[in-house]
Image: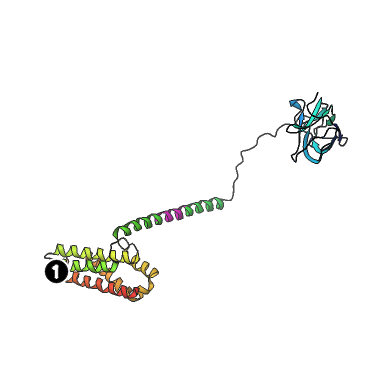
Amino acid sequence: MSDVPVWTCDFEAPEHLTVGHHFRLRCHGDIAVDWSADLPVIKPAKAEDEFALVILSAEQLKPQAVQLTVTGYRPGDHAPEYVRVMQGSRGFETEKPKWKIESVIAQDSAPPKPYPSVGPFSVFGPPWLALTLYLVLILAAVLLGRAIYRWIKRRAFRRELEAQRTALSPVRQFYRDARALRRRLNQATDSDELRRVGVDLDRQFRLFLMREFEVPALTSSDAGLVKELRRHHRPVMDVAGDDLRKTLRELSRAQARPATLAADVDQLLRMCVDVTEMIERGRK
């Protein structure tokens, strides 16, 4: 005896029913089934009959009657011992249903064969297309390389700037360094010491510019440094630009002279202090 109610079912299908064609299954019975909102599924008597009948949708699910839209994916004459329509453990069974699914392939036709593999194909475009792509890739690589290079330089400069910061403000630190250089200048007795004072003056003045404006003054050329300051600090350069350019030029020339005179170093020190005062006025 079946463990689920036995209902009576009828198929409503066209005369020639093919694989995948939708048709209707109507079933009713005296013993009610407590359906849920889920879509029921077909449980065939044999595992090989799976997909012979598949429920697509349920138009009606009443305790004693259902109307289902179904289809079949296995061609042939189907007459199983039973078919169950189930929702988990609840549902019904219909005995010895019969339906026929025709194949969409004609009986006298040759069996289908897969298409043979083809290719590989060689696709040639116009010569300028390959050249354009090549140039675009080169340009992208160059731009990426420049961006990475600039990022590395900025990062290195930031580390150097933090290492050169002092407790004093940039201008006060330079005035302090200038006084120390003045004492060394007054005590210098030979050309080598004068030269070292001149070298240190050049470095301390550039350190002042680096701290004050956060520019790589120690590694930039004089022209590049002035250009950078004019681009980002125009009010200051309007006041001190010409004198700053002249001071940087004279500091560079002093490094190239074979002999260093005390008067030259003294003049350079005065020029650096004067330009620093002009920069402060421009900042205000």
Q: Is residue 250 left or right of residue 192?
A: right
Question: From what the image shows, is residue 55 above or below residue 170?
Answer: above
How many marks are shown on the rendered structure? Answer: 1
Identify the coloring: rainbow
Relative to 3, residue 246 above or below = below
Front residue (pair 70, 255)? 70
Q: Which residues are magenta?
A: 141-149
Q: Quadrant of residue 204?
A: bottom left
- The quadrant of the picture occupied by the N terminus is top right
Q: Nearer the viewer, residue 107 or 3?
A: 3
Residue found at the far left of this picture: 189
Residue 258 visible? The answer is no
**Residue 139, percent across and down?**
48, 55
Residue 148 forms part of the magenta stretch: yes
**In this rendering, would 247 be left or right of 31?**
left
Q: x and y percent of residue 278 in the render?
A: 30, 75
Looking at the image, the residue that sits furthest to the top is 1
Task: Write down the residue under mark 1.
Answer: 186
Q: Is residue 100 magenta?
A: no
Q: Where 9 sits versus 179, above or below?
A: above
